[in-house]
Amino acid sequence: MEKQLHPFYHFLKNRADESLPGEYAHKEMAPVPLSPGFNLPEIDEKKAHPSAVLALLFPDEFQKLHILFTLRTGSIRHAGQISFPGGRSENGEDLLQTALRETKEEIGVDQKEVEIACSLSPFTLHKSENRITPFVGFLIKRPQTNPNPDEVEEIFSCNLDKLMNKHTLKQKRWSLLDHDFEVPYWDIHKVPLWGATAMMLNELLALYREFVETHSDN
């Protein structure tokens, strides 16, 4: 199966032990408070809930990479937002097991179809106190999906090259936590792609940009 995977998979596997661009990539897509002196509350990371998500990539017939997203239903945490499949760890499972289990439960993609390339930089989400570790998985083609109606309203995908286009990246002023924020987001759906998902995605895109630049030199 590995020989059929997109070259970006092999790129990530080979650089997985190098330093990751999470710190600056997360900061680029983090909402910026506009109130002078406002700071987010400190979180004890040791008390945060271990959580994991899975960013799934697949090629089209032209070997252009696409990434899967879910739109969460209105009855669960982070309702109505664009997300990657994932959630909190259960029953002593490790983080990769969490990501794969949640992916199966939410969108019906079995772990046998997925080749894991690497994990990305973990970070703590203030609102839910989740310590999230993102994993990057590859598929040989677009998967057959079966959304769980209790958690997922919609499954959709986007071309990575479209996400790299500066015209899809926008900003708007929102009120969050009773304060005004400048919020960066991707305009690729009727719902803005922002927040934690955007921060994780931005790190993946930083690596993809590195891959494209390296690949173009060969």
Image (cartoon, rainbow, N blue to C red):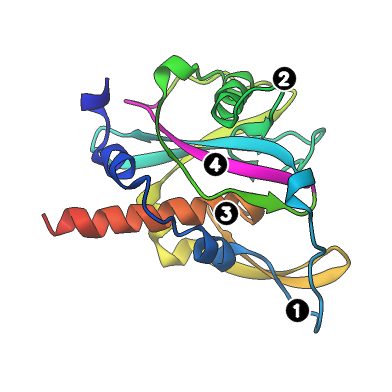
| Image quadrant in which you'd find residue 112 | top left
User: Which one is closest to the eye, mark 4 or mark 2?
Assistant: 2
Is residue 183 highlighted in magenta?
Answer: no
Q: Residue furthest front?
A: 46
Residue 41: x, y in percent?
A: 82, 64
- Residue range highlighted in magenta: 128-142
- Reading the image, the residue beneath label 4 is 134
Q: Where does label 3 land, which residue?
A: 198
Q: Earlier in the sequence, mark 4 or mark 2?
A: 2
Secondary structure category for the residue under label 3: helix
Amino acid type for the residue under numbered disc 3: Ala
Which mark sits nearer the N-terminus, 1 or 2? 1
Q: Quadrant of the C terminus?
A: bottom left
Do the CB atoms of the residues marked 3 and 4 lie less than 8 Å apart?
A: no
- Point out the frontmost of discs 2 and 3: 2
Residue named by callout 1: 34
Q: Earlier in the sequence, mark 3 or mark 4?
A: 4
Q: Position of residue 42 (x, y in %)?
A: 80, 62
Does residue 41 appear in this view?
A: yes
User: How far is disc 1 from disc 3 in space, using C-alphas?
Assistant: 20 Å
Mark 1: secondary structure: loop
- CB contact under 8 Å: marks 2 and 3: no
Q: Amino acid at mark 4?
A: Pro
Amino acid, disc 1: Leu
Q: Is residue 81 visible?
A: no
Pointer 1 with pointer 2, Cβ within 8 A: no
Looking at the rendered structure, which numbered label has been put on residue 91?
A: 2
Q: How many marks?
A: 4
* Image x and y of residue 88, in percent: 71, 32
What's the residue at 48%, 18% (across, down)?
Answer: 111
